[in-house]
Image: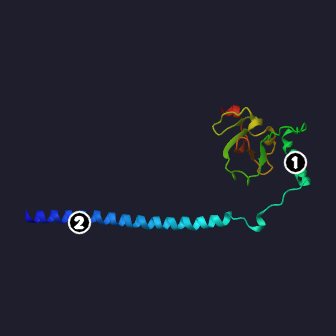
Amino acid sequence: MNTCKNLLIFLAGAALGTIVTERVLKTKYEQIAEEEIASVKEVYAKKMKKLEEPTEGDTEPEPTKEEVNQYREMASNYTNYSKIKKEDEKEVVEVYTPQVISPDEFDTNDFKTQTLTLYADGVLADEYDNVITNVDEIVGEESLDHFGEYEEDTVYVRNEELETDFEILKDDSNYRDMF
């Protein structure tokens, strides 16, 4: 029982000492912080006062009537730019048509790639053998005339609008015979 009592007295003393020390240090460092803040404010107040004092070269000469008139003319001409209508201007719309590209250019950008097959009977199909009906919009009709230009049985086409590079493979069999 005696040791328990001594232990409680010791813990109470330690807790009381911690609280007193914390409060003393807190007030001491708050006072130091306030003094530092006051000294910084004083330094910046002196700098601001120095900046606000006019120096000999700070005054600007009064503009002459001629300068004022020139300024008004420039300002009035400048503000009329938005009112000028250009009749010759036409809206420019960029149209991307599919283009034949070299094998080296194929799959060199962030575009998707897709393989198509051109059968001997003129049918163009995708990799799942679905017939492509809008050939001119996808790869361009004229691109199908470029077999043998780079490779004998392959043409590479880039469609900027669809952001896709197409690899068109030539197949000597007829689509209708196969499907």
- Say which residue label 2 marks: 14
Q: Amino acid at mark 1?
A: Arg
Picture residue at 24% right of the left edge, 63% below the top: 16
How many badges with numbers are in the image?
2
Q: Secondary structure at mark 2?
A: helix
Comes first in the chain, label 2 or label 1: 2
- Work out which quarter of the rendered image holds the N terminus and state it: bottom left
Residue at 59% from the left image edge and 65% from the top image edge? 44
Residue 134, given in percent of the width and then of the height, sits at 74, 33
Q: Nearer the viewer, residue 90 or 5?
A: 5
For label 1, the crowd category at 10 Å Cα-Cα, with few meaning under 14, some 14 to 19 and many 20 or more, is few
Number of residues whose C-alpha sits closer than 10 Å to that of mark 2, classed few (under 14), some (14–19) or many (20 or more): few
Which residue is label 1 attached to?
72
Task: Give the quarter of the figure containing the C terminus.
Answer: top right
Judging from the image, what secondary structure is the residue with disc 1 in? helix
**Horizontal and vertical percent position of residue 161:** 73, 41
As drawn, 28 above or below 179: below
Relative image position of residue 51 (x, y in whole percent)? 67, 65
Where is residue 96? Give x, y as percent.
78, 42
Residue 77 vs residue 87, the one in the foreground: 77
